[in-house]
Each structure stands twice: as C-alpha cells, then as structure tokens.
Image (spheres, rainbow, N blue to C red):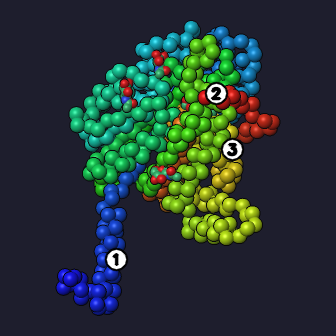
Amino acid sequence: MLPFKLNLLITHPLLTLIALLLSTLTVFFVQFLAGKSRRRVFLVDFACHKPPESQKCSRESVVNRARQHGLSEQNLNFMAKVLQKVGVGDSSYIAKSIMCDPPIFTVEAAREESETVIFGAVDALLAKTKVDCSEIGILIVNCCVFSVLPSLSSIIVNRYKLREDISSYNITGMGCSAGLRAIGLAKQLLEVHPNTCALVVSTENTTGSTYTGTESSKIIANCLFRIGGSATLLSNKPSHRESSKYELLHAVHNQTASSDLSYRSIFREEDAEGHTGVTINKDLLAAAILTIEQHMKTLGALILPLSEQLLYVKNYITRRLSRAKIRPYIPKFSRCAEHFLPHVGGKPVLDELQKNLGFKDAHMEASTMTLHRFGNTSSSSVWYELAYVEAKDRVKKGDRIWHIAFGSGFKCSSVIWRALVDVRGDEKNPWMSDIDDYPVNLDNSGPFPYYFQPAKQQ
Ligand SMILES: *[C@@H]1O[C@H](CO)[C@@H](O)[C@H](O)[C@H]1NC(C)=O
Ligand SMILES: *[C@@H]1O[C@H](CO)[C@@H](O)[C@H](O)[C@H]1NC(C)=O
Ligand SMILES: *[C@@H]1O[C@H](CO)[C@@H](O)[C@H](O)[C@H]1NC(C)=O
Ligand SMILES: *[C@@H]1O[C@H](CO)[C@@H](O)[C@H](O)[C@H]1NC(C)=O
C-alpha cells in the first residue's frame, strides 16, 4: 500500500505534472543561485620584468658565448642556422651569470638571477596596482627546473613581508604551460576564499639549465631560451571590480601523460656523455595533436559561438548517418577571441595549431613578435604578448583574450579573459620604448631546421 500522498500523485496526472514542474524549477533556481554566487575573478593588473640593457645579447654573441662553452664548429653552425630561422631577434636578454667570463653556474648566481627577475616584476606590479601587501592571501610561484631551499615562494614572502597565514604554492617541473596552470589554481582558490587577492609569479631558471653537450635537439631548446618573468594580481574583492583590467572567464587544462608517447615526447635527461638537457623527440607533433584535440573539445563547448557549435553537431550527425566519407568540421576558433596569444615555444607545434584552428598570420603577431624581442621566456611569455597588444592600444572593452600554452607531459592549458575597459600601454610596459618598431618582417623562407631526436624504444 502506497502512502496517501504518493497515491494521490499517481492517480492525478495533473498533480504529477505540477510536481514535476515544481521540481524542475527548483533545480534551475538552485543552479542559477550557484552560478551567481560563484565569485567573479578579476585580473587587477600584471607586470613583466624588463632586464637592463647590459644583458641584451645578439644572435651572434649567443653563438660566441656557446663557443666559449666549448661547442664544436659543427654544433655552432647548427646553432647559428637555428637562430637565423627561428625568429629570435638581436635584442633579447640573457642571464648575467652566462655573460660572465667564464660563465658562473652556482646556486648563488641562479638565486640572484631569479630574484632580480621576480622582484623586478613584483615591484612593478605593486607600484602599478598600489595594492597593500597585507591584502594578498594567496601566492603561487611557478618555475620549471629551478628549485632552491627555501623555495621561491618563501623568497617572495620574506622580501615583501607577506602575511603569515598566506596560502603559498611553488609549482616546479610543469614546463611552459605551468603559468596558465597557476592561474587556474588561483581561480579555484579564489572561488573558495572570500575577499582576497592572489599573486601569481611565473619565471624560469636558465642558469642551471644551460646544455653544454652536443646533441642537436638539446641545443635547439638551449639557444632560444632567454630570461624573463611576470607577476599577475588576481582578486575577487568587489572593490576591485571597478579598477581591474580583465575578468577571468575560463581556465581549462588537459594532459595526456598516461600515454607513453606523450609522456616521453619532451624529456629532461642526460645525453650519452652525461650532459643534462631537454630532449624533444619526433613524437612531439603526434602528442601535441592528441592533447590539443581533447583540449579543444572541452574548450569549444565553452567558448564557441552557437552557430559554430551547430555546424559541428550537424556535421557530426551527417557523418554518423551517411556512408560517404565526409571530413569532420573544424570549428572556426578564430571567432572565439579578438586576441589570440599562444606562448612562444615550439614553432612546429604553433604552425600546426595555427593551421588547424584557422588563424591567420596576423593573429600570431603578438606571439612571433614576443619571440623576436624577448626570446623564449617559457611560462611568462604569454604575459609579454598581452603587454604587446596593450602597448599597441588594441584591447577594447569587451574584447576576449585567449592565452594558450603547451608543455612537456604533454599538457595544454587555456585561459580566457574579457577586457573590462579599453586598455592602453603604460610606462611600465616592457614594450613601451620600442613598440613603434614592431611588427618587424621575419625571414620565413625555407624550411625550419628543426631536429627531433628519434623516439626511444621502450
Ligand atoms: C617547493 O620548493 C621546494 C624548494 O625549492 C621544493 O623542495 C619543493 O619540492 C617545491 N614544492 C613543489 C610542490 O614544487
Ligand atoms: C638552477 O640553477 C642553479 C645554479 O646554476 C643550479 O645549481 C641548479 O641545478 C639549477 N636548477 C636546476 C634544477 O637545473
Ligand atoms: C579537459 O580538462 C577539463 C578540466 O579542465 C576536463 O573537465 C575535461 O574533461 C578534459 N577533457 C578531456 C577530453 O579530457
Ligand atoms: C621554450 O622554453 C621551454 C622551457 O624551458 C621549453 O620547454 C621549450 O621547449 C622551449 N621552446 C622551444 C621552441 O625551444
């Protein structure tokens, strides 16, 4: 025997309908409230470190430096060829310790390098935002291959006398995409910690990662790498709503490290003679495509305009129903953002990405010009790119900005921002002194002499 009320519901179809309607409405209402109460995350401002003139290094002097490291003429020629083709110009910056004769590879030198870059960026950020250090409740530092004791985050807490109860994290070993991963982590933390600010610092230690051996694939990574760093202030404080530049819309991260092919495609290891360096093997493109496809599926559902999503679904259904071979529809991702800012590393991967997402050369300008002016600064490069479009006065209120980065693992991360105001370049912008010289023409003729190490047999 059913309880009385349930009985009534079953016997009266109208009541059932009303009950169903009510429960649906409740579900919608709860979801709506949850969406509303999720804290909005703002990017108050960011800053990039600009090293002093004395650390500028032309391509020719990079090769000369390497000659002093004892590289053979054959390797030096290879290096010079890569540098001609890859798009790094003559005014990027190298570490002070590498400029010394002989170069210094001590912990002290590495710490000093990191400190100069980090303090340079954070000082500029604090000056720009005028935020009080006591307002910072979350600190995240990412630096791939450098690990000191105490950690870089402790170095920052100590220097700026940050709060004792600060949640601090240092992310190491996560490659070029770690900077965007750090933004994603800050977003998640800001969603649960009310009324606070998060400071995210991205940098890289190049002193210790200079490769001194003779394997071509390791030399490539070596000769593009330059120093740089960025500091970003995120906030969920309602009081920052008015003074912020951007709002964070989405942060999506995907990785395919469970596949051996992916996992092995970029690897830091010793070569046959015992010199440590980063190997990039020929599986890189396959790994990148696998990961980027998964990433785009997730991201596409969030950011593609409805019309593109419908075209995709229509194509998917026709492909399922018809026997004829129909090409899968590749949505026009170029319609998702006004400013596309992929990190500077890995030209073959970037070319592939540009082709597949339907971006034109003009869309890649911020990325290629950043590589030309500042070299590969790893995870902080996406911030030099945003500084570039700001310096060009291109960011208008409502514009969407798409940061995307890949890295060993294989990992792919995207962060999407919306501009809350028309943004203009300010005097702390690292591009300000030479923005009018850009964009420059790059010599794109001939194939890129990329060299992949054969994949290792397992
Ligand atoms: C943080 O840094 C310390 C010292 O550099 C290091 O030992 C530790 O593994 C790092 N933690 C993480 C999570 O990277
Ligand atoms: C960072 O640089 C220092 C100094 O050169 C070096 O001792 C250290 O090994 C480097 N870290 C890594 C993991 O390469
Ligand atoms: C990509 O990452 C997001 C989280 O950032 C996750 O929800 C999604 O399932 C991932 N996509 C794939 C295809 O693994
Ligand atoms: C740029 O630097 C990162 C960090 O070391 C490295 O993983 C990546 O392979 C570099 N990109 C290129 C094209 O060398």
Q: Secondary structure at mark 3?
A: helix
Q: Secondary structure at mark 2?
A: loop
Q: Given the image, on which type of amino acid does mark 1 rest?
A: Thr
- Local packing at callout 1 (Cα closer than 10 Å; few below 14, some 14-19, many 20+) is few
Point out residue 312 in the picture as x, y percentages from the top left corner.
Answer: 62, 65
Q: Given the image, on which type of amino acid does mark 2 rest?
A: Lys
Above or below, comparing residue 402 to residue 63 in the picture: below
Marks 2 and 1, Cα distance to the nearest angstrom? Answer: 55 Å
Q: Residue at x 69, y 28 (%)?
A: 454
Q: Name the residue tied to disc 3.
A: 351
Q: Name the residue tied to disc 1.
A: 24
User: In what quadrant of the picture does the N terminus appear?
Assistant: bottom left
Which quarter of the frame holds ligand 1? top left
Point out residue 328 in the picture as x, y percentages from the top left corner.
Answer: 68, 60
Q: Name the residue tied to disc 2.
A: 456
Marks 2 and 3, Cα distance to the nearest angstrom? Answer: 25 Å
Which residue is situated farthest in the right direction here?
446
413 relative to 355 in the view: left or right: left
User: In what quadrant of the picture does the C terminus appear?
Assistant: top right
